[in-house]
Amino acid sequence: MTGEVINHLLQSTVFAILAGLLTLAFRKNRARVRYWLWFSASVKFLVPFALLLTLGGYLGRSPAAKSIPFPAMTYTVVEVAVPFPVTPSPTPSPHQNVDWIASALISLWVCWALGIALMRARAWLRIRAAVRDSKPLQIPFPVPVRSSRHLLEPGVVGIFRPILLLPAGILEHLAPKQLEAILAHELCHVRRRDNLTAAVHMVVEALFWFHPFVWWISARLMEERERACDEDVLELGSEPRTYAESILKTCEFCVESPLACVSGVTGADLKGRIVRIMTQPAVDKLGLGRKVVLIAIAIVMTGWPMVIGLVSGPQIHAQSVGEAAGPRPQFEVASIKRNRSGELIRGVSTPRGRFIGRNLRIRPSIAWAYHVQSSQVIGGPSWLDSDDYNIEAKVDEALTQDEKLPFPQRMDQLRLMLQSLFAERFQLKVSHETREGPAYALVVATDGPKFQVQRPGEKASRRVTGPDGVTSQSHAMGLGPGELRGFGMSMAELVALLSGQLGRPVLDETGLKGVYDILFLWTPTPMATGFGISGSDASSVDPSEPSIFTVIQEQLGLKLEPTKAPVEVIVIDHVERPSEN
């Protein structure tokens, strides 16, 4: 997150510098051109390029786009009991260090932003008070004109329903020609909607108060805004001397400085304005060549992030189940019935030639079918998490019994069959997306790893003795209630099993490349199998016993640290309750 903020600030800084260089190139043209260049630099602070990338990616989505496969995750489990990884509710790490420096900086930013917002709110309240106490004036003008007793300069108040507010007594202070020039100036502010653009920049000031370029842009905006109105008033035929005198007399009448929430007549460098009004320096019209340059720059600055997002758009795409590449394998026959018994025991077994799921919740079942965690299945009706179903299906006997077919491949085939079943019987349609979400990073603790490296030539029948003194025969590796046992286990296999246990992705950042003999025990939390919550009771868990986070550090010499990572999610676009059979 910090890196993204810094990147956005750097982008906005470079954009502001480029805008400043462009204003130098257009210094002999009308002020409105430079004003919009500075305003674009202000808006850039609110629009990160990442947003344009996302927009381009959204435009690049195609209903027929091919699905990007999920990151390879190895689920190797012991072929006993329920041969699926267990998935408890995510448990926060008890050892989370607080970044006090970051917290202090965030607190400072929030307090200062609120302070600026309160200052703007106070100015706005003063304006509202002036409007409430004002009286209407019978002056022909495109917007209502009112007179206020408050010591304010003439100015346009409001964004969508503007009002021209004049201080009481100003009409007697100005000659008719001078009043006409002031009204022409304010009409320019109304037509240009300067209050709206000023409000946008005030939001930028509140959010990015710490950036010096924001205040530099603010001064340039006010200067070019008033200069643009001056140019328009003179172009309408006002005498330069009369117009200059009207500004000076207004400044003499108004003793208060102008408010940021009002587009007035006395803003910017007064001396410089009077000199420009009286001398009327030549202003070049914006020729075709310069217009083409501005349009090309605008297209490049806003278009290239969208083009990049458009090109990479297929990485974030929608795809219905029926549009997957190639036909999925299917169960030969399947029976689905609602389980209303209220029992807590849930499980899946694969006896000879059959798939039997008892008392299954649908969301975790969809998650298992798509090789993700339940937290990665987004959307859908509430019954996905409340209704229980019994599913029995006939499969090829070789799929469940043939030892020559590797176990992970058999599980992959069952997953594809379940996907077909959900698509046919539940009318399930999903989208695959990548979102940033919570994860854990598995790193080596300070004391280093505490498990054994498997020596070359050792057989998988070696007996593994754990910290509890229990010796077990390990032919594979797997996760049981409160224990993990494995012989010849790689870090990739370990993080895959931990992902299932913790309910969120685990990233291997240990740098360990070998295979290891691993066994550790912990106090289990209430479990969630790949198809729903098991019958474990939270009240039976002793909170004084060490959690899996503590045990991993003490018994394995590793550590789980909370982090953020791109996470593949399944978005449920459509699903229906199945007809029972």
Image (cartoon, rainbow, N blue to C red):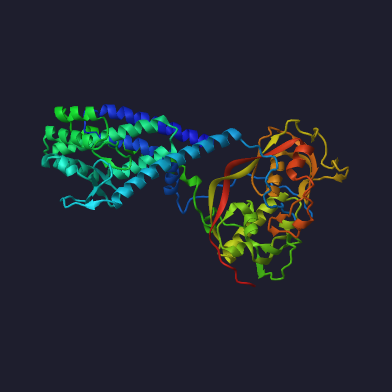
Q: In this view, does 441 lie above or below 14?
A: below
Q: In this view, does 382 lie above or below 189?
A: below
Left or right for 342, reference 12: right
| Residue that appears at 18% across and 38% down | 232
Q: Is residue 307 visible?
A: no
| Residue that appears at 65% across and 57% down | 364
Left or right for 279, reference 290: left
- Quadrant in which residue 348 is drawn: bottom right
Q: Nearer the viewer, residue 39 or 107?
A: 107
Q: Is residue 434 visible?
A: yes
Q: In this view, does 527 lie above or below 25?
A: below
- Quadrant in which residue 275 is drawn: top left
Q: Which of 536 and 168 is in front in this view?
A: 168
Q: In which quarter of the image is the C terminus?
A: bottom right
Left or right for 299, reference 507: left
Q: Which of 556 and 508 is in front in this view?
A: 556
| Residue that appears at 79% across and 51% down | 542
Percent position of residue 302, x then y: 37, 39
Percent position of residue 135, x then y: 23, 52
Q: Quadrant of the N terminus?
A: top right
Percent position of residue 211, x then y: 43, 32
